[in-house]
Amino acid sequence: MQALYAQLLVGLINGSFYALLSLGLAVIFGMLNIINFAHGALYMMGAFTAYFLLSLGGLGYWWALIIAPIVVGIFGMILERTMLQWLAGLDHLYGLLLTFGIALIVQGVFQNYFGSSGLPYAIPDYPQIGDWRGLQGGINLGFMFLPIYRGWVVIFSLVVCFATWFLIEKTQLGAYLRAATENPTLVRAFGINVPRMITLTYGLGVGLAALAGVLSAPINQVRPLMGADLIIVVFAVVVIGGMGSIMGSIITGFALGVIEGLTKYFYPEASNTVVFVLMVLVLLVKPTGLTGRAA
Amino acid sequence: MSALTDDTLPVTPRAMRDEMIVFAAMALLLALVPFTGIYPFFVMQALCFALLACAFNLLIGYGGLLSFGHAMFLGTAGYVTAHALKVWALPPELGIVIGTAAATLLGLVTGYISIRRQGIYFSMITLALSQLLYFIYLQAPFTHGEDGIQGIPQGHLFGFLDLSKPTVLYYVVLAGFLGGFLVIYRTINSPFGEVLKSIRENEQRAISLGYKTDQYKLLAFIISGTLAGFAGSLKVFVAQNASLTDVHWTMSGEIVLMTLVGGLGTIFGPVVGAFVIIAMQQYLASYGQWVTVIQGVIFVACVLTFRRGLIGEIAHFLRRSL
C-alpha cells in the first residue's frame, strides 16, 4: 500500500504540472488564438532561471518562486510584441509553427551549453523553525511517509490554479479578459487597450509555465529537454479536457496525473502511454472533449 | 477562410503543361546525378524525404490538415520493412509492400481518430498519437529499443536488381520517388482533389453541397500515410537501419519544416524544401545542437516573412501554379 500512495503522490505532482501548463495554454489560446508550442521550453526556462539565481546570484528557492515567473513572463511578452502579434488574422496553424520554431531555438541554445544531462537543484532548507528545515524532510502520516516538498508542490499548485481561476472568472480584469476573448473589437470600442491585454495574457500564461518549472526543479532536476516531452502530454490533456473552461483544465490536469500515477502502480509498462490512450478513447466516445464545445 | 494559400490559381491546361515541363526537367536532372560525382547517398536520402514531404503536403496544402505526427508513418513502415527483410528474410519488393501496407493500416486507424477534430486540435492529436507510437516502439522487443534494427540486407529487387550497388539502388529509389510524386499529382488534380480543396476553403459549404467531408479527409489521410510509409520503406534500403529517431517528434517537425521552406500547397515546393533541409543538415553536421537552433530560426523566419516558401514565391512572381 505504501507504494500505491507514493505513486498517487507522484501522480498528483505530475497532475499539478499538467494543470498549470494546460491552464496557461487555455488562457493564451482564448486571447491570442495560438497554441503555444513554446510552453514546454518556457517551463524549462523557469527551472533554469531558478538554477541561475542560485548558482550566480545566491538567491534561493523562495526568491526564484517570485522572480523566475516574472523574468520568463517578460521574455514571453517580448516574444509576443516582436513576433506573435504579427500573426493576428492568419490561420491558427501559423501560430503553432512559429512557437514550435521558438521552442527549437530555446531548447537548442540550452542544449548547446548544458548538454542533455540534469543539473541538481536542492530542496530549500530554510526558513528553519524548530525541527523544520525549510521544505526538507518528511512527515509520517501513519499510512504513508509524506516528503514535505512534494506535499508543498501539490498544495501550492492548487492555490495558484484557483487564484488564476478567481482572477479570470471573478474580477473586473478577468471580465475584460473574457469579453475581449469573445469580441475584441467591441471591447476596444469601450476604450480598453486590447493589444496590451493580449501581451499581459501571454505573459501570465508563460509565467504559470515558469512557475511550474521552478516547482519541478528540485524533483525532476534541471534539464534542457525537460519540457519537450511534457508539452506533448499536456497537448493530449488539452485535447481531452478542451480549452473552453479554466476549471475544466484544472480538474482534467489533476485527474490525468492521478490516473497516470495509478497506472504506474498497477501496470507500469503503460505509464508513458496511458494519457494518450485515454485521449484516443475520449475522441472515440465524445469527440468534442470532456468539457468542450466544438472547436 | 483559409489563409494558407491566399492566391490559389485555377488549374488550366497551360498550368498543367507548365507543371509537366518542370516535372520532366526535374526527372532528367535527377536521372543524371550518378554521372556528376555527387554523393548518391545524399541524393537518395533527400529523395526519400522529398516524397515524405510531398505526402505531408497533400494533407496540409490541399486538405488544410496540419499533421504534426507524420514521422509515425516513416518509422512504422521502416520498422516493418526492416523486420521483414532481416528476420523473415523476405525479398525487397515484398518488404516494401508489407511496410507500406502497415502504414496504410496505421493511416486508417489514426485518421479515423484524428479527423474527429479540426484545425489546431487535429495537429495536437496527430502529435500525441505519434508520441504514443514512439513509446510503444521504445518498449516493443522487435524494434530493439534504443539500438534500432541494424545491418539490414538490401537483397535483389525482383530477383535481378542488386540493391547493394549504389547506382542500381539510386535508380530504384528515384523510380519510387517519381512514381509516388505522380500519384500525388494525379490525386491533387482529380475530382477527389477538387473536393479536398473545397473542404480546405470552406468545410461547412462542402457539407451543405452534400459531400461527406469526413470520408474525404479520411481517404486523404490514408493516401498521405501510405505514401509517407512508402518513403519510409525505401529509406530502409538507403540507410540500412530503422531507429527511434524516425518516429520521434523532431522528425515530424523536420517534415513540416521542409514543406514550409519549399512552399505549403505547391507541387514542387516540398521536393526543393527537402533538398535544402537535408543539405543543411549535411553541411552543418559538425555544429551539433546549433542545427536545431538554425532550424528553429528558419521556422520563425518562414512564418513571419516568407509564408509562401521558395517555390510559392517563384510561382507568385510568375503568376503560375508550380
Image (spheres, coloured by chain):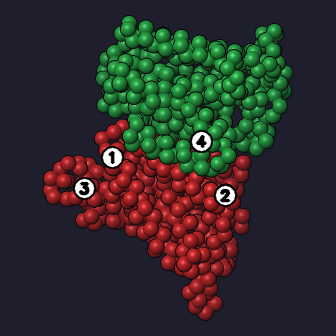
Chain colours: A red, B green
Report the residue at 43% width, 19% height from top. B322
Report the residue at 55% width, 39% height from top. B253
Kindly identify the amino acid type of the residue bearing the numbered disc 3. Answer: Val
Kindly identify the amino acid type of the residue bearing the numbered disc 2. Answer: Gly
Q: Chain of mark 4?
A: B
The mark closer to the camera, 1 or 4, is 1
**Quarter where residue B148 is shown:** top right
Residues tagged 1 and 3 counted as in contact (Cβ below 8 A): no
Farthest residue in the bottom direction?
A130
Residue B177 lies, in percent from the top left, at 62, 18
Farthest residue in the front direction?
B36
Disc 2 from disc 4: Cα separation: 19 Å
Disc 4 from disc 3: Cα separation: 35 Å
**Quarter where residue A116 is shown:** bottom right
Q: Quadrant of the N terminus of chain A?
A: bottom right
**Are the residues under badges 3 and 2 in a single subunit?**
yes
Disc 2 from disc 1: Cα separation: 33 Å
Q: Chain of mark 3?
A: A
Kindly identify the amino acid type of the residue bearing the numbered disc 4. Answer: Trp
- Residue named by callout 2: A115
Disc 3 from disc 2: Cα separation: 41 Å
The mark closer to the camera, 2 or 4, is 2
Q: Which mark is residue B249?
A: 4
Disc 1 from disc 3: Cα separation: 15 Å
